[in-house]
Each structure stands twice: as C-alpha cells, then as structure tokens.
Amino acid sequence: MKITRVDMDNLRTVELDVRNGAVEDYRLDVYVTKRVPGYSRTLVQKLIKDGHVTVNGKAQRPSYEITVGDHIVVNVPKLIEPQMVPEDIPLDVVYEDDYLLAINKSPRFVVHPAAGHWEGTLVNALLHHCGVLAETDDIYRPGIVHRLDKDTSGVILAAKTIKAHGALTDQFENRTIEKEYRAIVWGETRFDSDVIDAPMGRDPHDREKMAVRKNGKPATTFYKALERFDGFTYVACFPKTGRTHQIRVHLAHIGHPIVADSTYGGKDAVFARDLCGEIEAPSEGSEPLICRQALHAFRICFTHPVGGSPLECSAPLPEDMESTLAALRKWKARTRGTEAR
C-alpha cells in the first residue's frame, strides 16, 4: 500500500472507458488501480464500497468483472504526502566527507520512508546528521544511491551533493562498483565457488516476491564458500547485477536459501536448540540466534565521485550473525572445507 492519507473534501472526477477486449477478465478494483496511478488497490476498494465509483451509472462491487463498453466514473481524493522530518537517530558511520557517506546499516532499519514507515528510517536519520542530501526524482529518497532490504545489514552509500549522486548512480548502472555480501545458508554447497546466472522477474504467484524466470532480466551472482558446517555453509557473494532480492533468490534457486529468510527460505528464525538439540540447549535457548535473513553487505569498492580515487568501505558482521556462526562452530563444526577469513 503506497498511500496512507487522503483528503476526502477535495475530490476530482476521472472517467474511464473500457475499450480493450483483453481486460474483460479484470475485476473492477484491479482495473481502476491500474488506470489511476498512485492509488493503491486497498484505497480503490474503499472508494468503491463508499460509492465513489460507478459503472454505467450504477454502483458495483469491487469484484465486478468489467467488459468492453463499460463507462467507469471515479471520484478520487487528493493525496496528502507525508513530509520528510529529520530525526536524531544514531548512525554507525563507516566513511564520510563533503560529498558522500557510508553507513553500516543495522538489521530492521528501513532505508527510506514508505507506507507504514514514514518515520524512523535511514533517510530521516541522514537528514538530521547531514542537514541536507542530494535531491532525487523521489522526494522520499534524498541522497539514496542504492538500497538494502530492511532486514539486510551492512554498508550503504548516500550522496550529499547532486554531482556525487549522479556519479555514484552511473557507477552502479555501469556495474563498475564491486559489492561483497556475507551470508549463512542452509545446506552444504556442492562447489567451493560457482556462478549463478539466472534471469529474474516478479513471481507470477506473489507480486511481493521475485523469482528466477526464463524471460526475466539478466542476473548474475558469484559465490564462494568460506566455511562449511554440518548442514550449513558460510558464503561470500559478489552480485554482478543489482536485481531486487537477487542474492536471496539466487541462493534459494540452487537449493541453499539464506538462514532465517522467511520469504525465500521458509523458516524465519534459528535457535540454539535447532543446532544442538533440546538436551544440550543452553538455558537462554528460548531466544533466537537470528530472526532475520542472515545476509550482510560486507564490503563495497567504488571510485570517489569527485576526487576519482578508489575507495573501499566495509562493515563487520552484526552480532546476530556472529552468534550464529559461533553456535555453528560449536555444534556443527566440520574438519573439511575452507575456513572463514
């Protein structure tokens, strides 16, 4: 859902004529959502139920199946966009100068405002820390050059100036930036290193997820096993493209989903008892070792957007991943394989 606040005292009328025979299978709420950008399906359903949408002069249910020739009238309210507010939120600054900064983002830290998270985001914290950030096409993403999922920790860059933002964006688009992630995955990878070259697109069964798809966009990830355990592997991942959820989808695709990834790996947490059994489990074993995907943006290498010098920024593993690795070394250790560096 993209919109949370509307002004029902300020309505405008939108008239839609159904002319394309291919849309005959669409429900009314789906069709209106597609034809009126910026209004979520949830909001459209409410408008329909409240009588602000008519079909051929009559009120209909959201599930009404439209047909060619239908004339739809929608009274849409004015959208009230939340304002960006600087917030005094502590930041773990890895690098900073007059043009950019690199932050070690903690888990559960949303990068930019969106529905359900208008406050307490990394952008809110950056605005307080920097005072001003480079403007972008999206007013809710000032300074943001790339993003990390809410539950992915690690290094993320932000630009203070428009020039720096443009130069960094070009590097991402031209794939000249090198990114290294660390992940703990289920199962023991067959190879010590390999390339996953599998195109990706939206999951046809769940629009909130991504999936490997034959006609998707090119996506390539190189991985290397750093440490092997009984039933787990600690890996380094080097994405060559930047598709949404790429590493998570690619590792799941080869049969090694990331530990505690509820979206692509099934189980949403790992406990000490999962590794050692109920009998050996420590007294504090009721608390999970990790309850978010075990994925960390470990290192990023790029060219300074103004000076042109090479820069490398890295962030140590967060406590939950370190604790999980420590538990694996204690209860799931193996003698073969490579060791973590």
Image (cartoon, grey):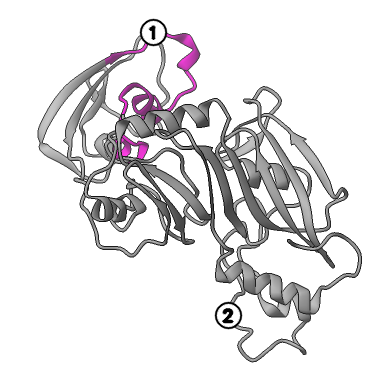
Against 50, is 274 above or below? below
Residue at 69% x, 79% y is 272
**Element at label 1:** loop
Against 20, is 158 above or below? below
In the rendered structure, the answer to whether residue 5 lies left or right of residue 164 reads: left
Q: Residues within 10 Å of mark 2 (few under 14, many from 20)?
A: few
**Element at label 2:** loop
Whether 223 is among the magenta residues is: no
Q: Residue 210's x, y, as percent?
A: 59, 38
Against 172, is 299 above or below? below
Residue at 75% x, 72% y is 328
At label 1, the amino acid type is Arg
Dividing the picture into quadrants, the one containing residue 164 is: top left
In the rendered structure, the answer to whether residue 231 lies left or right of residue 208 reads: right
Which residue has dot 2 on it? 287
Q: Which is more N-terminal, label 1 or label 2?
A: 1
The reply to whether residue 121 is visible in this rendering is: yes
The reply to whether residue 208 is visible in this rendering is: no
